[in-house]
Amino acid sequence: MSSTLSPQTREKLKGVSTATLASALFKKGLRNQMIQGSVPLSPPKGGSMVGVAYTLRYMPAREDLNPMTVFRNHSHPQRKAVEECPEGAVLVIDSRKDPRAASLGGILATRLMRRGCAGIVTDGGFRDVAEIGALDMPSYQARPSAPTNLTLHQAIDINVPIGCGDAPVFPGDVVVGDMDGVIIIPAEIADEIADEAVEMTAYEDFVIERVRNGEKTLGLYPPTDERNLELFAAWRKERGR
């Protein structure tokens, strides 16, 4: 794993949304960090899913290299990834946006959960979705898929740079998931983005409270009226934000 995630940054990211993070990354010129087509099968509990990326890459399967017997090999990349994905990490799977065969199933997902992984994400599909959805670990997929991965996917490498749902994912990048989906934060700016997202979230909470009370958004969001910044400062002090 090419980076570490501090407990402080992890906790900050658990309290912010992927929407807010997308805006913070957009300000940095990063527009392609959201994994497209991957939706929550089992939503995160107690805040957003947060972990560093551990990756698995599939390529199109060549039939003569993918009989069922390949799983007898303990070095098979899919099985190796499940046993080596670190505690607190998120297994991110490049399935080439092809959900016609499963990226993995309930047994391997259960193993990841028992090993303390923070979640699993694929731009393909899972099999055994009822089992995976019931696990105490968030998961994201394009749609359910019963056929074994060997039908169409050949596991070729682990913990290398991948594309997942058109987003670039490097090992050690920070993965955040909520009900809107999954976003990837480059490891080297994770602390900075987390700090900015916390600040943005505080102001967004202030704004939504005002809007629910009937306020108009003009001058409030964005805060082009200086008076709103004064009111926000007082609101923040009152709430310890």
Image: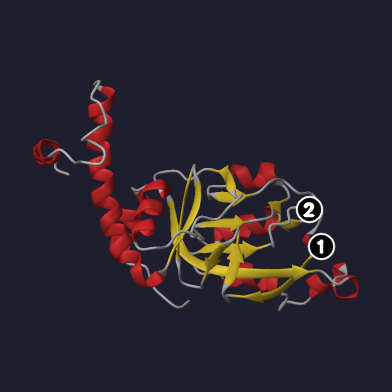
Q: Residue at x 86, y 75 (%)?
A: 65
Examine the rendering and report whether any part of residue 187 can be seen.
yes
Q: Nearer the viewer, residue 39 or 34?
A: 34
Secondary structure category for the residue under label 1: loop
Q: Point out residue 220 in the picture as x, y percentages from the top left corner.
A: 22, 35
Q: Nearer the viewer, residue 154 or 108?
A: 154
Q: Point out residue 160 in the picture as x, y percentages from the top left corner.
A: 58, 76
Report crowding for label 2: few under 14, some 14 to 19, many 20 or more residues within 10 A (C-alpha): many
Secondary structure category for the residue under label 2: loop
Looking at the image, residue 56 lies above or below residue 233: below
Q: Point out residue 73 in the picture as x, y percentages from the top left corner.
A: 77, 77
Q: Residue at x 27, y 40 (%)?
A: 204
First in sequence: mark 2 or mark 1? Answer: 2
Q: Horizontally, is 81 left or right of 69 in the view?
A: left
Q: CA distance from mark 2 to mark 1?
A: 8 Å
Given contact means CB atoms under 8 Å apart, are the residues at marks 2 and 1 in contact? yes
Q: Residue at x 56, y 45 (%)?
A: 40
Q: Amino acid at mark 2?
A: Arg
> Residue 188 bears which disc, if any?
none
Examine the rendering and report whether any part of residue 88 can be seen.
no
Report crowding for label 1: few under 14, some 14 to 19, many 20 or more residues within 10 A (C-alpha): many
Q: Point out residue 128 in the picture as x, y percentages from the top left corner.
A: 72, 47
Q: Amino acid at mark 1?
A: Leu
Looking at the image, residue 179 lies above or below residue 107: above
Q: Horizontally, is 45 left or right of 71 in the view?
A: left
Residue bearing mark 2 = 100
Looking at the image, residue 127 lies above or below residue 170: above
* Quadrant hosting residue 98: bottom right
Residue bearing mark 1 = 152
